[in-house]
Structures are given as structure tokens and as C-alpha cells.
Image (spheres, helix red, strand yellow):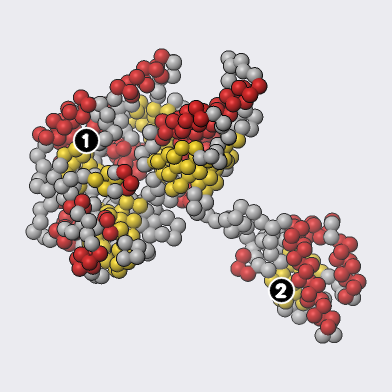
Amino acid sequence: MFKQIVEKLITCLRGKKLKRDIVINVEKLETRVAVVENGRLEEYMVEHPDDERLVGCIFKGRVQNLEDDLQAAFVDIGLKKNAFLHYWDMTPDQDAYLDEDEDEEEEEELKPGKGGKRRGKGRRQATRLTNEQIHEKFKPGTEIIVRVTKGPISTKGPRVTTNLSLAGRYLVMRPGANNRGVSRKIGDAKERDRIRKILDRLLLPDDVGIIARTVGIGAKGSAFARDLRNLLESWNELKGNIRNLRTPCCVYKEPGLVERVVREWLTEDVESVVIDDEKTFEDMRELTSKISRRAKSKLRRYEGVANVFEHMGLERQLEEAFRRQVPLKSGGYLVIDETEALIAVDVNTGHHKTKEGKELTGRNKQEESILEVNLEAVEEVARQLRLRNIGGLVILDLIDMKSNKHQKKVVRALKDALKRDRARTNVLDISKLGLLEMSRQRVEESLLSKLSSTCPCCNGHGLVKSPLAISIELQRQLTTLLRRADAEKRPFVPKIIIAPAVMQRLRTEDAKILAELQTRFNTKLTFVAELHRHPEFFSIQDAETGNVLYSSGGNRQFI
């Protein structure tokens, strides 16, 4: 808390008071939310009406099979792909949730400790089951209640856990725990003690745990009590769904994007929430009225002619932010590539200009310039990871720094920039090759994957064969067919169908070679360019019979 106050004071003294706004754009096919700080886009979220957000949802499923080699169970929760449930996420008391006589509520949030192991006393999941116990308790066909912790990505199904939780604005509840805690992100000791006293006064059902969230900093006891009542209502409804709905089914669904924004982002440091849709504006007014009058007073209805994102200069920022090459203010740039295995970020100096006021020469000037670019780059990388919602393994190819002091400074700057990230991150030191490895928690597909489809031309490779390569392949296949016809003593007049770019190549650069081919085999070559033909694919026909003798395209001949 003290550190945050100091940072705010420093910012104010520099004349750069933090101004944070939330902008919500609602359309028929898409809802967009942007978090803007001093006019700069810092967070970006998108939701479509047809999207089914699974992370945080709770399902009643059925165990399909147990795989000891993977140390995991596969659970049918009613989706196309079975959910993945690791053995360490299975508890011995799951049948309690399916018992109609049980009157259970919620449990507290698990936090992974060092090495990925889970920690916390008095929790069911602290008792690790052996493979024999799991096979005995969770036989195929057994009903089980699970919460989705990671949505389906690429060919993988969702990941689930039996550690249930319901998130409110100020509290997180989990059934099965009996402790009351405060988020570790609340660092101020006095504030932690104040919140603990509030939690101790709350009336909780048996076997229910709660954790106070960071949003609760400065909140009154009545706000915590009101949030608790709402969570208990949700849990009672969830229990009714568990008893009454048929397996597999969803028994609790996470709220939509706008409601999550109120829950997660509408904090004291937000100056305004700008909304361009009347219904959404009224829904937000109703939601925020349950929080406080101050929160409600921050809502603004946008009624301008231009799109609200365009009006606030966000469309241009989005266009720049989601390019493969991202410019830096100093003149350097980043190149960001998403692959199946990892995210690769290349840092380049570009047309970097040293900051004014620094009179350096020779080697010192070069090293300081490299340091400046790398420091700016890691700040932008942290922002890009949030904006694009990308995670997994991330490799930063920084500009080589010989000074260990400079390397440590860059790593420290990256860690500081990642502190505001809600996803868990882990940063390693710079390797001898100048690479910085880090990981970022990935719970759902990246925005790039969600908003784009595979290119029909390159099939996702980013490259297609050149007209030269196609010309060589065409002439090779054509020569083979002409030789075969010549050996069989039968007439053959080829008709070649190609893409316009290849036709241009044949006319201008390969015309002499094709003329020699006609003379050699005493035939006439006919070429036809089809506008929408894929640039890599061509076909060779018999002009007299119309039979296709060779086709390089398969099912991707046209675009």
C-alpha cells in the first residue's frame, strides 16, 4: 500500500497524474471493453454473442476414463472434447456435492506454492490420493462436480479442477474450506488487519471459506456483507442445479463481459466508464447501484455519431498494437510471432535515437542506447501480452548487453511491468545467448486466435511459393507428360490452367523456354489464367478430351 502511494505521489510530482477510464462498445456481433490510462490503451477484452466463456463455469460431469500414465482423468461435461482433470485436482469428498441432504456453501481460493505444489492447511485437496484410491473412488461413470480453470485451446479440451469457487466483487468463496483469508496482493499490514476483522464478523455456514480480494481495499464492512449474501444466493442456486439437472450439464455460468468488468475493473482509481449502448448503460447503473453511489456516478452515456472507440482514438491504437511489427517511441520496434510451442519476440533498434541530455561517446553511448531500447521493449512486451491475451512460454530475443548490471536492470524492469498483470507470470534471468525466457498463465485462446482464421493462401505458414518455383514445377510435370505421350506415339495438346501471377512470369521471363518445349515435342501449349485460382496451384489438361492429367491443388485450388 505504501509503495502504491509513493508511486502515485511521484507520478503527480512529474505532472502525469494517472487518469484511468473504461470504454465499452456494444454492437450486435461484438462487445469490446478497453481500459485506458492517460489516453493509452492498456487492457482490451472482446466477447461475441455466440462465444461460450467456460473459465470459471462449474459443471456436473461424468468420469469417462482414468489414465495413470498422464496422471489424469477425462471427464464428460457435455462439450465436444472431454475435460482434462489432473489427479492432484481430485478430492476424496466429491460425492458430498451430489448429496441432496448436504447444505454446503463455498470454499477459498487455492494458490500454488513453489514448484507448482498446492499449499494450505485444512483443505480436502491437501490429501493426495493414490492411484488405487482414485480408481476405487472415481470409476468410469462416476458423477463429479468440476470448475473450468482453462478453456479449450487449439486441439486440447478444457482443464478442470474439483476445487470449486465463486468470485464476487470483494470476496471469493469456495466450498469445503473453513478459513477466512486476505489476498496476498494486499501488502499493507494495517489494511490486512482491518479486512480480517471485517471477515471475522461475517456469518458463514459451516465448511465455507472466503478470501478478501484486492478490490476490497478501503471498502466498508457492509460492502463485504452484501457481497457475501449475493454469493450465498448463487451457491444455493448452484446446489439446486446439481440436484435437479441431468448429467452432463453446466450448473453455474460465469457472468458476461460487462458484469465481469464491474466486478473486476470498476475500482476507486477509475474516473469514468463510457458506454455507447442504452440497455448496457441501464444494466450497468443497476449493477453499480448495488456497489455504491460513487461507482454509479462514474457511468457516462456516449451518444456521439462516430464509434466510441474511434472517438477516443482507440481504433488506431488497436491497429498498431496488433501488428506483427510493433513500433517503440524511441524508434526501435518489436516483432511478435505466435507459434504452437511459444511466443517469440524479437527486439530491434530500428532508427533509435538516444534521449536528449545524455552526452555519451563511443562504446558507452552504444551500450546506453541498447539499454534504453531493451528497457522500452520489455515495458511494451508486458503491455502486448495483456492486450493480445497471449501466454504460455514467451522468448524475448533482446539486443545483446555485455554489462551484467544492465541485464539485471532489464529483468527487473520487466518484472515491475508485469506486476499489474492479472495472469501469473514467471521471469528467468537473461541467458548466455541473450534470450530472456518467461511464462504467462494461459487460460483461454489469444485474441489473435479468436479474431482470425487460417489464411486460405498460405494455410497458416505466412508464405506461398514464388512464381519462379511454380514455373519450375509446372515445366517439370509438363515435360514428364509430353515425354510419356511421345513414347506412346499419341497426340497430346496440353492446356495449362494457372494463377495470374504465374502467367505473368511465363509471358515475360519463361516464354523462350516454353517455345523450345513446343518445338521439341511438336505440340501447342495453351495457357489460361483464372483470377481466383490459388497462386501455388495449377492443372494440366488434355485440350482435346478435357481430361485432367495433373493437378497440384487438391482441395485448395481456389481462394
Q: Amino acid at mark 2?
A: Tyr
Residue pointed to by mark 1: 182
Label 1 element class: strand
Find residue 199 and report its horizontal and vertical position in percent: 14, 35
Front-lying residue, 529 or 457 = 457
Compared to residue 306, the image places residue 107 above or below, namely below
Question: Mark 1, mark 2: which one is toward the viewer?
Answer: 1
Quarter of the picture containing the C terminus is bottom right
- Contact check, label 1 and label 2, Cβ < 8 Å: no
Residue pointed to by mark 2: 550
CA–CA distance in space, label 1 to label 2: 70 Å
Q: Quadrant of residue 523?
A: bottom right
Compared to residue 274, the image places residue 9 above or below, namely above
Among the two numbered marks 1 and 2 on one chain, the one whose residue lies closer to the N terminus:
1
Label 2 element class: strand
> Residue at 25% of width from left, 64% of height from top?
131
> Residue at 20% of width from left, 51% of height from top?
126
Front-lying residue, 515 or 497 = 515
Q: Left or right of 187: which side holds 344?
A: right
Front-lying residue, 341 or 293 = 341
Find residue 380 and report its horizontal and vertical position in percent: 50, 34
Quarter of the picture containing the N terminus is top left
Q: Left or right of 290: which side holds 400?
A: right
Find residue 11 and report its horizontal and vertical position in percent: 41, 19
> Residue at 76% of width from left, 67% of height from top?
474
> Residue at 42% of width from left, 55% of height from top?
153
Q: Left or right of 105: which side holds 63?
A: right
Q: Is residue 338 visible?
A: yes
Q: Amino acid at mark 1?
A: Val
